[in-house]
Image (cartoon, rainbow, N blue to C red):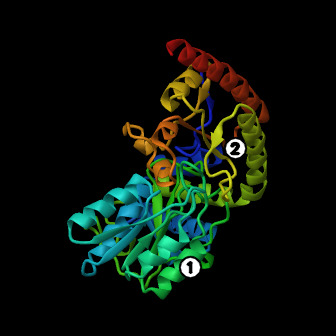
Amino acid sequence: MFAPVYLDHNATTPLDPAVREAMLPYLDARFGNASSRHEYGRQARDAIDRARARVAAAVGAHPTEVVFTSGGSEANNLFLKGAAATMKPGVLAVSRMEHPCVREPAKQLARLGWQLEWIDVMPSGVVDSGQYAECLAKRPRMVSVMLANNETGAIQPIADLAAKARQAGAWFHTDAVQALGKVPVDFRALGVHAMTLSAHKIYGPLGAGALIVDKRVELSPLIAGGGQERGLRSGTENVAAIVGFGAACELAVQRLETEAMRQRSLRDDFEAALSDMQATVFAAGAPRLPGTSFFAFDGIDGETLVGKLDRAGFACASGSACSSADPEPSKTLLAMGVAPELARSAVRVSVGRGTSAEDMNRLIQALRQEVQALRGLAAMAV
């Protein structure tokens, strides 16, 4: 079977064999409901407790601060809507580069009476500190800024932003889904009140995530029922997925340093070749995730180029997988001041543990061929 070289790890990652092995018993003999009080239930509860401790250890949190969810989208919604439900509507400040699962609930809250303030992003891909100060002067009740952008890979100065938000009296939340396993993530050092994680971005299973939340933050649950997860997320737990999440977190921390160094080398060599081809690399001057390149060739449609690369044997992306149905240019790039025409040319390559230097060399060759062919077609059409 034909299998393109997979270069879309920011969208999702393959399940690690060790993670699969950890999950298998809970898909077979250890099938108990963690709320049951017999041996089958106790086995499931113990497995969840061990996984909770592993997730907490990966980000420097306490196990009691981990609330398991179905993924990053639910965790982001749980914080924004859950916190909003416990207070009177006020100012909510959200960065313009957030994932849709932060932007959309923020818009929903605006329709319920909240004053939504958008935090601007500089051309570098980093939050505009001056305009951020203006937002804080409006005394927001909540602030949400992602730790690392899923498209550009740009890393935000979250510790500084969170400290300023605390001084302004706001709860500060960060979506750390893309950062976990790629750069060090420390809940305490960042100084945030809440942080979102997801398993399938770190070679864990789909359908598992977590909100790491300071116990001083009051939340109203999105899902009421049996009172699981300290009453913040009712529903019978997906034990196998949670176990896989814990195993993936442990492996991610063990491999982080060496894998980040290797991926950064792949990215830097790739971007040197992009420069030779006169490509624009977005957020190139900002601190970035080690394995993410978001780039464009002027005059070449990104979706078209992604399709050509797919047929040539390379699975890349034209932006966020969760926004693929949206025909509009990347909202992150538009927020950075990138012209819509160039934003429509954007292509994202995100490497992973299985990506080799040979894979990237072949991708460079394919890019040269496809870009030259598309430029030739464009010239003929003039």
Residue 360 percent location from the top left of the image: 73, 33
On screen, residue 220 above or below 152 = below
Can residue 61 be seen in this snapshot? no
Local SS, label 1: loop
Local SS, label 2: loop
State which tag comes first along the sequence, 2 or 1: 1
On screen, residue 12 above or below 223 = above
Of all residues, the one furthest to the left in this rendering is 112
Three-letter residue code for mark 2: Arg
Q: Is residue 203 left or right of residue 369?
A: left
Residue labelled with disc 2: 353
Q: Residue at x 34, y 60 (%)?
A: 236
The residue mark sitting in front, 2 or 1, is 1
Residue labelled with disc 1: 191
32 or 51, which lies in front? 51
Q: Residue at x 66, y 26 (%)?
A: 367
Q: Is residue 327 left or right of residue 352?
A: left
Of all residues, the one furthest to the front in this rendering is 382
Disc 2: CA contacts within 10 A as few (<14), some (14-19) or many (>=20): some
Residue 116 percent location from the top left of the image: 32, 68
